[in-house]
Amino acid sequence: MKEKFDSLIFDMDGTLWDAVDSYCEIWNVTSRELGIDRLVTREELIDLMGLTIDVIISRLFEGWEIDMEHYLQKLTENEHLLMPRLGGKLYPDVFRLIPELSRQYPLYMASNCGADGLKNFLRFTRLEPYFRDTITFGETGKDKPYNIRLLAERNNLGNPLYVGDTAGDCRSAHMAGVKMLNVTYGFGYAPDADYYADSFLQLTDMLLHHNPLVIWQKEDYELRLDRIQTAMTVEGAEWGIVADNANLFYLTGRVFCGYALIPAKGRPWYFVRRPVGLQGEKIRYIRKPEEIPAMSSVTPSSLALETDTATWSEIQRLRKLFPEAEMRNMSKIMMTARSVKTPAEVELMKECGRLQTEVYAMIPSVMKEGMTDVELQIEIESMLRRKGCLGNFRIHGNSMELFMANILVGDNGDTPSPYDFAMGGAGQHPSLPVGADGSVIHKGEPVMVDANGNFNGYMTDMTRMYAIGPVPEKAERALRCSQRICAELSAMAVPGAEAKKLFERAVEIAREEGLEHYFMGHTQHAGFVGHGVGIEINELPVIAPRSRDILRAGNTIAIEPKFVIPGIGAVGVENTYVVRDSGSAERITCASENL
């Protein structure tokens, strides 16, 4: 199994257990109690497995004059009473291997059974601790495709695998946009399934013991590699070595300890130190980089190294591997390649924007007069983490640091920071001098929130303003000006536009509004109004007065026109946009820009 899934959604009947005999008993008890002379057989129920309970009743009693609603009510009551005692029989190895699967994958269940069906199953089998959430037809009244989508949405599942046993399960999974693994030992067969397993042991082996190094889908991986190799050709690099975490993640979809040796043409080599067990094309395990030349049989005439992020000693060590090669800068090559996002990258960033927007909408519910900016940041961080935020705030270069968010209240927004961020703040300690410093939130005081948008290894950058009660007129004016700048610059952000022209227009607008003295800082000014964003918060292109960058379709840029007004505080909004082939850039951070 080459694809990497982030979670597993299990069907119940025919997949994890066989409880058909118990179901027959419950159906027949119900019929006897209602005076219906109709016995349900095991063979009949197996043929109907996977259908919703209302459809099963109509099929079993086709031509019978019964009160369907009353029958379903009585059947539900009997299931509630009898199923916890009757139960079913788990398939071989399920009880032993479910805990092992749960250590690597979050586990969920979706079934067409009644409201109590999955609860009864989990209690009877003692598997309840290993499943995070369940959903049934009996709870929602909706079909399985809807329920799979709902389950994935409310648990932020990016790429789940549905495990079932029938063609109906397969159709439902595919209609929900989810791939399906067919366990062939169950009640049916799915000819259109994406994967097959003849036993639960085989299923577990497929999911746990194949750990591909490259996680991205093949088409997306090829696009990423092509962009790297195109940039290498422009820079005259025959081979390049990548070891930086952000660059390894860009290429493979994971972070590992080791090196990617990338040719300007052909397939990369991967030299891994940790973790063990990674599989795929041209992977070699090494103890030290000095093993790379012999294993790869490569003798490059030119070699690119990550001179922006690697230490001097690391660079010298890698140079000695190929002493005759002319040196190039792999950091520049990777930043260039990463600046134009693939369609899959854009979708990942849109997901981040959606989740970040949901959190920002909840901020007014936790913001209270008299709380400190640090207390507010803690509440926001908690909401972000509960939504699935990874917490890591990747920043290119070693001289900038930030933890989760930059929350600025009042005059703290005018405190200079040593970092190259748009806004500063004193922070809580000189070891991390940026952001919230313990300032108390008062009525009429603008509160700026610029919080972490990393939910899947990519980031969106968004700033919004909050306040308890009306703010001063000058703050309102600055906010409207910031919104205007975002609107005009996003309209200018078309392929071929000069990044510096966007900066110049932002300054013009601030001057027109009489706010140029507060634009991008007051005591200390930031030298840009926007920047690329993706795996790291500060990527190419840079929207600055001396920037030579030209916008291209697929650039993802954050535009952040901000103002610092003495005695009032920091004011402004920030959005992340995708530069499109034509028309204005697409905004993917969609929280309301209003105060």
Image (cartoon, helix red, strand yellow):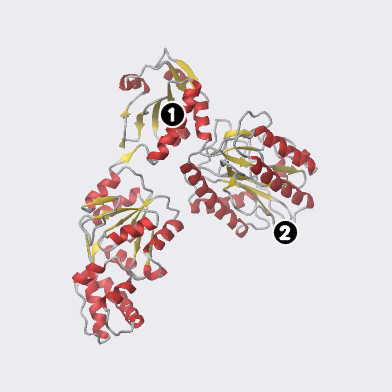
Question: What's the residue at 30%, 61% (across, down)?
Answer: 168
Residue 446 at what x, y percent from top left? 71, 51
Residue 120 at what x, y percent from top left? 31, 68
Instruction: Identify the residue under disc 2.
Output: 469
Task: Give the amino acid type for the residue marked by disc 2 in the picture.
Answer: Gly
Compared to residue 124, the image places residue 487 above or below, namely: above
Residue 460: which quarter of the image?
top right
Q: Is residue 525 visible?
A: no
Residue 240 at what x, y percent from top left? 43, 24
Element assignment for label 2: loop
Task: Give the amino acid type for the residue marked by disc 1 in the picture.
Answer: Ala
Q: Is residue 505 visible?
A: yes
Instruction: Identify the residue under disc 1.
Output: 243
Q: Which circle, 1 or 2, is nearer the viewer?
A: 1
Split into 4 quadrants, where in the image is the C terminus? bottom right
Compute the Cα span from label 1 to label 2: 50 Å
